[in-house]
Amino acid sequence: MNDDMRNKIALFRYGVISPLIGRRPRRGERKRTLTKLAEVVWTTPDGSERRFAAPTIGTWLDRYRNRGFEALKPRLRSDRGKVQVLTPGQIELILDMKREDPGRTAKLIQRELELAGALREGQVHVTTIQRLLRREGLSGPVTELDRPARYRWRAARSNDLWQVDAVHGPALFCPASGKKVRVKIFSLLCDRSRLIVYSQAFFEETQQAFLTVLAGAVQRRGVPAAILADNHGSFRGEDAQIACAQLAIRLVFARPYDGASKGKIERYHRTLRSQLLDRLDLEKVTTLDQLNARLAAWVEGEYNRRPHAGLDGKTPLTVWEDDASEVRWIEDEGEFARAFVATLVRRARNDSTVQIGGRVYEVPTHMRREKVTISYHLLAPERLWIDDRETRVYLREVDEVGNSERARPKPNSKKRRTKARKTGLNAPEAFLRRMTKPGRGQGGAA
C-alpha cells in the first residue's frame, strides 16, 4: 500500500469519527453515536461499500485522541519490501533475467519462468515481480540509461528545420495497376511552428513522391535550413540527396527504429488519422484527386489555423508568419527548375545507344563512342535529354523493330577521307623475305 492510499484511508476514518471529535460526549452518548455510525453503509477509498462495527470505529476514535491523525493511517507491514512467495533462488533468477534483457517485461518474465517450470502457474502475481524489479532499480527510467538521452526541444525559428514522414491512408483504385492500392501520404512539418508546409497522397512511396512534396513546399513556404527524415529509401535515395544539396538543404537522418526522435510529425499523423483519415466517406472518396482535395482543405483550413497546445494557444500559421521575414525564398524560376535537375555521364556505344537504369536509349549518331552528359528531371526521371550545343535533344528508348526498317543516312561526301599514298610496306612479304634471305635484314621495300 502506497502513502497516497494510506492518507486516503486516514481521511476516510477521520470522516467516520468526526461527529465525536471536538466535544466531550455526555454519559452514554458515545455508545449511542457509535451504534448509529455502525449502521451506516460507507463508501471506502477503494470504491467498495461496507459497514464497520462499533468497536472498530471506537478504536479509530481512541487512536486519534491519543496519537493524532497519523494513528488513523494503516500500519505498515513489518515485512514490507520482502517477497514472501518467492525463494531466494527464484528472486535471483528474475533479477538475472531482467539484467540479461532489459526489454523483458514482468509479465514476460513470469510466463517464461512458468514455461520453464521454475514457477508454478499462478504461484506469483505479476505485480509482485514488478515490485521486486522496482525495488532493485530494474524498472522504469533506470533501464533506459543505456539508451540515448531524449529531451524536449524545438527549432529556434520557422524553417530552421522541417520534419518529413509518410503515413498509410485508405486503399483506393489505382488506374496504373488496375486494382486498389493503399495510398501513402507524405507531409512536411515545420518544427518551430508545427505548420504543415505541404502534404499530398500518392500511390507509391518513392523518391519522386517526396520530391514532389518538397517542390510544392519550397514554392509555398520557402527553403528550410534542414530536413529531418527517417531512413526510408524515399528520403535516402541519391535523387533526394541531390535535390537537397542543390537547394542548400541539410538532410538529417534519425536513428534507425527511433520514431520518437520525430515526435512532432508522429503526433501530427495521429491527429490526421483521428480527424480525417478514419472519417472519410469512401463512397464519395474513390480517387486520389478526391482524397488530396479533402486533405488540402483540412490542412489549410483546419489544422494550420487551429490553436495548438504546444504553441501556447497560437495557431501554427500565426507562429510561422511571425518568422516569415527570415525565410529564404527562391525567386528565380530558372534556379528553382535547375535545383530539380540531375545529370549523369555515360559512354555511348557504337550503335548510338546508352543504358540507364536497365533501359536502353538512343543518342545522336555523331556521339557514338563518346562520353555524353545526360540530364533528367528529378520529379520525372523518365524524361532524359542531352544538350547538344544549343539544342536540347530528348532521348527515347530504342525501338529495335522500328530501327530494322529505318533509313540509314549516307555519309557526308564533303568529309571523305584524303586519298592515301602507297608506302610499299607489306607485312607478309617482309616475313617471307626474312625467312628466305635471313642475311639481308628484316625490312625493305616490296
Image (cartoon, grey):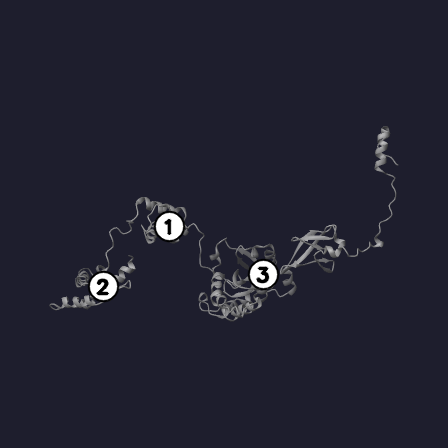
Question: Which residue in the rendered view is the most extreme toward the left?
Answer: 27
Of residue 53 and residue 138, the one placed in the foreground of this image is 53
Measuring from the top left, give residue 104's x and y in whole percent: 40, 50
Label 1, label 3: how far apart the Cα atoms are: 46 Å
Element carrying mark 1: helix
From the viewer's perspective, tell me whether residue 326 is left or right of residue 354.
left
Q: Alpha-carbon distance for marks 1 and 2?
A: 40 Å
Horizontal relation, residue 421 to residue 48: left or right? right
- State the SS at label 3: helix
Q: Which mark is residue 111?
A: 1
Q: First in sequence: mark 1 or mark 2? A: 2
Q: Amino acid at mark 1?
A: Arg
Q: Are marks 1 and 2 in contact (CB under 8 Å)?
A: no
Alpha-carbon neighbours of circle 2 within 10 Å: few (<14), some, or many (≥20)?
Answer: some
Residue position marked by numbered label 2 in the rendering = 13
Residue type (three-letter) at the residue carrying disc 3:
Ala
Residue 170 screen position, x and y as percent: 52, 64
Q: Gap between marks 2 and 3, in whole Å?
A: 66 Å
Q: Give the structural element (helix, strand or loop) at label 2.
A: helix
Residue 376 visible? The answer is yes
Mark 3 or mark 2, which is nearer the start of the sequence?
A: 2
Residue 158 percent across, percent down from the top left: 52, 64
**Which quadrant of the figure contains the N terminus?**
bottom left
Q: Residues within 10 Å of mark 1 (few under 14, many from 20)?
A: some
The residue type indicated by label 2 comes to Arg
Task: Point out the residue furthest to the front here.
Answer: 179
Position of the C terminus, as image quadrant, is: top right
Is residue 363 visible to the viewer in this orientation of the structure? no
Residue identifier under label 3: 209
The residue positioned 21% from the left and 66% from the top of the image is: 16
